[in-house]
Image (spheres, rainbow, N blue to C red):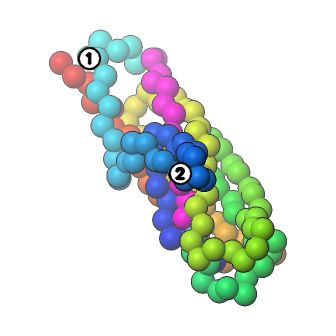
Amino acid sequence: MLIKNILICEDIRQEVGNKLSLMGVLGSSINIDTPPNMPKEFSLALSLACLISIENTNTGNDAKDFNIQISIFIGENKIGNITAKIQSTGIIDRMSHFPVPKFEFAINKTITLSVHAQIMKKNTLVSENTAILDIILNKIS
């Protein structure tokens, strides 16, 4: 099992036919304009989601042997931790996509969001990857 990528976006929607739609896929940074008179103690609420894509590198893998651990950080502060079994009703597909529900947080300065994912097989690390998003607050005049 290999974590191929982690996409950070504004929303993920489940569509008819078991399709996923990603809204507002972000790159390495997002710029948010704020009024110049915004008080320093004011916090801006943000809500994001992410999609983790996993490649099954061995068709002999048994899904029940694997779990995924996801940690979300704002700067150095962990704001979320998710652990889930990788489930399958049959053979694990070559590519699987795991949507992470929207998570909310508040910021009052330019900061970095990190999403770190690990695949574990019976308490042994198999694969890991991290997506980093710079959230830049710009005061407009």
- The residue drawn where x is 59% and y is 77% is 94
Q: Name the image quarter holding residue 93.
A: bottom right
Magenta-drawn stretch, dominant element (helix, strand or loop): strand
Q: Name the image quarter holding the C terminus.
A: top left
Return the residue at label 1.
36
> In the rendered structure, does residue 45 fall within the stretch colored magenta?
yes
Q: Nearer the viewer, mark 2 or mark 1?
A: 2
Labelled disc at residue 133: none
Q: How busy is the neighbourhood of tag 1: few (under 14 within 10 Å), some, or many (20 plus)?
A: few
Residue ranking furthest to the front: 17
Return the residue at label 2.
20
Secondary element at image label 2: strand
Q: How busy is the neighbourhood of tag 2: few (under 14 within 10 Å), some, or many (20 plus)?
A: some
Q: Give, as a single range, the part of the protein colored magenta.
A: 41-53
- The residue drawn where x is 57% and y is 33% is 104
Q: Nearer the viewer, residue 36 or 57?
A: 57
The percent position of residue 113, horizontal first and vertical second, equals 48, 46
> Is residue 29 shown left or right of residue 51?
left
- The answer to whether one can see residue 138 in this image is yes
Secondary element at image label 1: loop
Q: Amino acid at mark 1?
A: Pro
Above or below, 86 against 15 in this view is below
Q: Earlier in the sequence, mark 2 or mark 1?
A: 2
Q: Name the image quarter holding the N terminus.
A: bottom right
- The answer to whether one can see residue 49 in this image is no
Q: Nearer the viewer, residue 33 or 99?
A: 99
Q: Amino acid at mark 2?
A: Leu
